[in-house]
Amino acid sequence: MPGRLHGKVAIVTGAGTIGAGMGNGKAVALVFAQEGAAIVAVDVNAGGAETTANEIREAGGVALAIAGDVSREADVQRIVAGTIERFGRIDILHNNVGIEIPGDPVSTTEEDWDRVHDVNLKAPFLLCKHAIPHMERQGGGAIVNVSSVASEIPVGSSIAYGASKAALNMMTRSLARALGPEIRVNAVCPGYVDTAWHRNAHGDERANQIAAHYASMVPAGDFARPEDVADAIIWLIEGARQVTGETIFVDGGLHISPPR
């Protein structure tokens, strides 16, 4: 039986991982592939993109790996052109890539501010700018941006990150207003997600402590896995025909009961 995304072509940015384990982008790429989509796995790290693409191929799926810095327009143009050359269309654009650089209003440097906004906000804009004309020519598509619970709950220790994600939410709504009805645009806002990035950054013992603390704070009583975020994204793409311009929180309820 064909999957829910059979015959579709999906660009997934940040599709690699740092070290072993699972990240949000890789989880989405694998789930999309399981549902029948051909995947363009994009990552700044060529090895990470190729690893994800290889796993998809080994499981019987179709994947193309492209390395590139999506905050650079030339790289984005190359990624979109490579997708069209190989598959002839773009049905799904998943803007997953993002970075966080800690810093309060005084300690945050201009360089850090610009880098965070380049990756978290300019990159999704550039990908939309160059992918949307192909979606319009073929009669439609779906875009899902990855925002964060930090777009709703102020995080004083990472001013640039929270500001960039709040701006991404507004860009999502603006895109949905401009592109409907042919193209639906939504965002997911994860909370703490147990990813390879967190485990590499903190080590397993500290990552387990952070995860347990987070689980104790939220109404759902647990933290998210990358696959939970992927499930929400699949629903936004294929199961939510009347949903556009929305930000869906995958945070265990943190945004309705933030810590004091």
Image: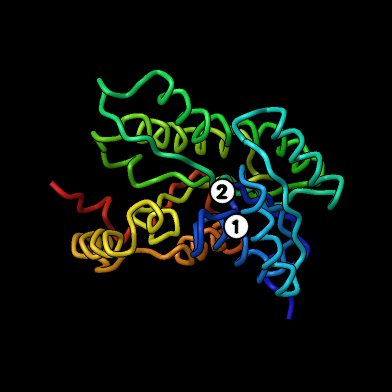
The earlier-in-sequence mark between 1 and 2 is: 2
Please, what secondary structure does the residue beneath circle 2 have? strand
Please indicate whether residue 66 sits to the left or right of residue 106 in the image. Answer: right
Please, what secondary structure does the residue beneath circle 1 have? helix
Please indicate whether residue 260 sits to the left or right of residue 192 in the image. Answer: left
Return the residue nearer the eye: 72 or 48: 48
Please indicate whether residue 172 sits to the left or right of residue 210 in the image. Answer: right
Q: Amino acid at mark 2?
A: Val
The reply to whether callout 1 and callout 2 are in contact (CB within 8 Å) is: yes
The numbered dot on residue 108 is none
Tell me residue 192's x, y (percent): 34, 55
Tell me residue 214's x, y (percent): 24, 59
Residue on which the image places disc 2: 144
Q: Which residue is depicted at the point 43% across and 59% down?
A: 195
Tell me residue 148's x, y (percent): 39, 46
Residue on which the image places disc 1: 237
Q: Which residue is depicted at the point 17% across and 50% down?
A: 259
Q: Amino acid at mark 1?
A: Ile
| Residue 206 sits above or below residue 122 on the image | below
| Residue 260 sits above or below residue 203 on the image | above
